[in-house]
Image (cartoon, rainbow, N blue to C red):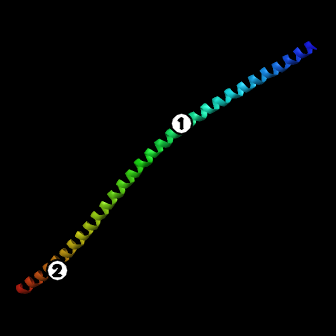
Amino acid sequence: DARSAVNEMTTVNSRAGADKRRVEGVLHTMQAEIDDMLHQAKNSEEKAKKAMVDAARLADELRSEQDHVSVLSKTKRSLETQMAEMENCLADANESAMRGGKNAMAKLE
């Protein structure tokens, strides 16, 4: 009986040791997976921070370019107005020159 009990306990002990080793192996695998996930999360956070910095920089550049376009548009409108005024002055000067030329021709005749 004692031998049978010892053999049974040895078998139970062996199974328990095998189970312990299996659980320890699973535990080590899980720890490695957790470490890998933490590393990936840290890399993702760094990439996200970099992306936010890039997005902020691009937003600043966009605002700057929009301001620049606005200034250029105002300048263009101003120059177009000046050009129209100068064209009117030129037309008036041409008309006056034509009248003056006709009057001079009439006096010469």
Question: Dot 1 corresponds to which residue?
Answer: 42
| Type of amino acid under label 2 | Glu
**Mark 2 against mark 1, which lies toward the viewer?**
1
Q: Nearer the viewer, residue 89 or 43?
A: 43
- x, y percentage for residue 14? 81, 19
- x, y percentage for residue 30? 67, 31
Q: Quadrant of residue 31?
A: top right
Answer with left or right where residue 8 lies relative to residue 32: right
Secondary structure type for disc 2: helix
Residue under the image location 29 percent in, 64 percent down: 74
Question: Dot 2 corresponds to which residue?
Answer: 95
Secondary structure type for disc 1: helix
For residue 58, above or below residue 17? below
- x, y percentage for residue 40? 57, 36
Q: Residues within 10 Å of mark 2 (few under 14, many from 20)?
A: few
Answer with left or right where residue 55 lies relative to residue 76: right
Residue 109 visible at all: no
Q: Nearer the viewer, residue 24 or 65?
A: 24
Residue under the image location 69 percent in, 28 percent down: 27
For residue 102, above or below residue 64? below
Residue under the image location 8 percent in, 86 percent down: 106
Q: Nearer the viewer, residue 97 or 62?
A: 62
